[in-house]
Image: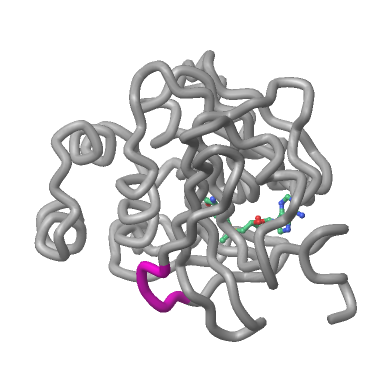
Amino acid sequence: MVTQQIMRRGVVTPRVIEAFKKVPRHLFVPEQFQSHSYNDHPLPIGEGQTISQPYIVALMTDLLNLSGEDKVLEIGTGSGYQAAILAELGKEVYTIERHKLLAERAEKIFKELNYQNVKVLVGDGTKGWKEFSPYQKIIVTASAPDVPQPLFIQLDEMGKLVIPIGGRWSQDLTLIEKRKGKMIRKSVCGCVFVPLIGEYGYRDTD
Ligand code: SAM
């Protein structure tokens, strides 16, 4: 997975590669799909949600340019795999999931793997997690119509935020930077994510 899918497509940052070699992706995948854990595609994780394709997890991680001092906010815990990768690379990880069942399952795996720097919240991640803000890095792993305003407010000056922005069926993976309070946007590539459902995302009925 690391050589063929991630490095060959251009994600070669040594710290990022080490994290992907270390985190056991199959433990985050439901048992019936575990034999496909390292394949080049997303997989179902229950509640109609998915664990993203390994390469897209790697690309989004790489775009954040994480340092060991970063406080990171993730919206969309899902399986917990992306959060575990972030926990290898940042200092503290705060991750929010709207489905209680997924959040609980991920939290159990974090405990089993002894990740002590990850905190999980069940709720609407479009509002962020003000208590621990500002965050040097924010990653949104579901697609939004635009950047949820609370997330930009909770992003630190010079911080980076990665988010898929666009319509329900296709989006642009977008890198946002905060410079002197202003939003600088860079479109990275096309992508397809499940929707971000919440007050500053899509409504459940959209
Ligand atoms: N990062 C995950 C992983 O490593 O498995 C993959 C996330 S999956 C593509 C997107 C997740 O975002 C789903 O689990 C979904 O329930 C969650 N989600 C959607 N809207 C949300 C919201 N407003 N707040 C928190 N989580 C949300």
Q: In the image, residue 32 lies at what x, y percent?
A: 50, 60
Left or right: 51, with 99 as reference point = left
Quarter placement of the N terminus: bottom left
Q: Quadrant of residue 91?
A: top left
Q: Residue at x 19, y 53 (%)?
A: 11
Q: In the image, residue 119 lies at what x, y percent?
A: 65, 24
Residue 162 in view in this figure: yes
The foreground one among 98 and 166 is 166
The foreground one among 180 and 105 is 180
Q: In the image, residue 48 lies at what x, y percent?
A: 69, 69
- Residue 55 forms part of the magenta stretch: no
Q: Is residue 152 above or below residue 9?
A: above
Residue 109 in view in this figure: no
Q: Residue at x 78, y 22 (%)?
A: 131
The quarter of the picture showing ligand 1 = bottom right
Tally of numbered tags = 0
